[in-house]
Amino acid sequence: MNSVAKIVSERILKLLEKDLAPWKKPYFVQGGVPTNFTTKIPYRGINRLLLIPEAGKSNYYLTFKQICARNAAIKPGAEKDWHLVVFWKCFNAKDSSE
């Protein structure tokens, strides 16, 4: 199984091979900022680089659980068209000496 770092690196390299620098803002304007369809919250951090919409495609994304919750299904053959989303959360760890 691939590590998240390896998947992220491969995705960025593929974009660079297409002469697309995913961190440059003008590219985001083309398809809009990647946004979660259900929550309408734009993705942040590395997910903005991972979810760059292709020309002519939507900039909205759903998780598999969100698709199932809508009693919807993935079109046959579309399961190969998935995108990685990295979940991260900041938290304060308690000092173990307390």
Image: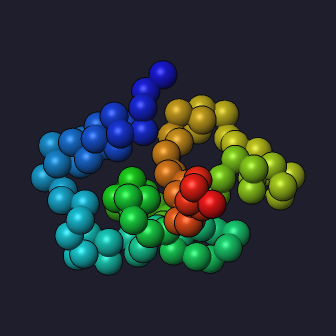
Which residue is depicted at the point 58% across and 53% down? 96
Task: Examine the rendered structure and indicate whether residue 62 appears above or below residue 68.
Answer: below
Relative to 23, 80 lies left or right: right
In x, y percent, where is residue 6? 33, 34
Q: Quadrant of residue 31?
A: bottom left
Percent x, y of residue 39: 67, 73
x and y percent of residue 40 in the render?
Answer: 62, 77
Check the image and name the residue furthest to the front.
97
The answer to whether residue 10 is left or right of residue 93 is left
Left or right relative to 24: residue 76: right
Residue 85 x %, y % = 51, 51
- Left or right of 70 on screen, residue 80: left
Answer above or below: position of 48 versus 33.
above
**In what quadrant of the picture does the C terminus appear?**
bottom right
In front of the other: 57 or 47 = 47
Q: Toward the viewer: 70 or 91?
A: 91
| The one of 87 and 15 positioned closer to us in this rendering | 87
Note whether residue 66 is visible. yes
**Is residue 61 something that shows in the picture?**
no
Residue at left 64%, top 68%? Answer: 37
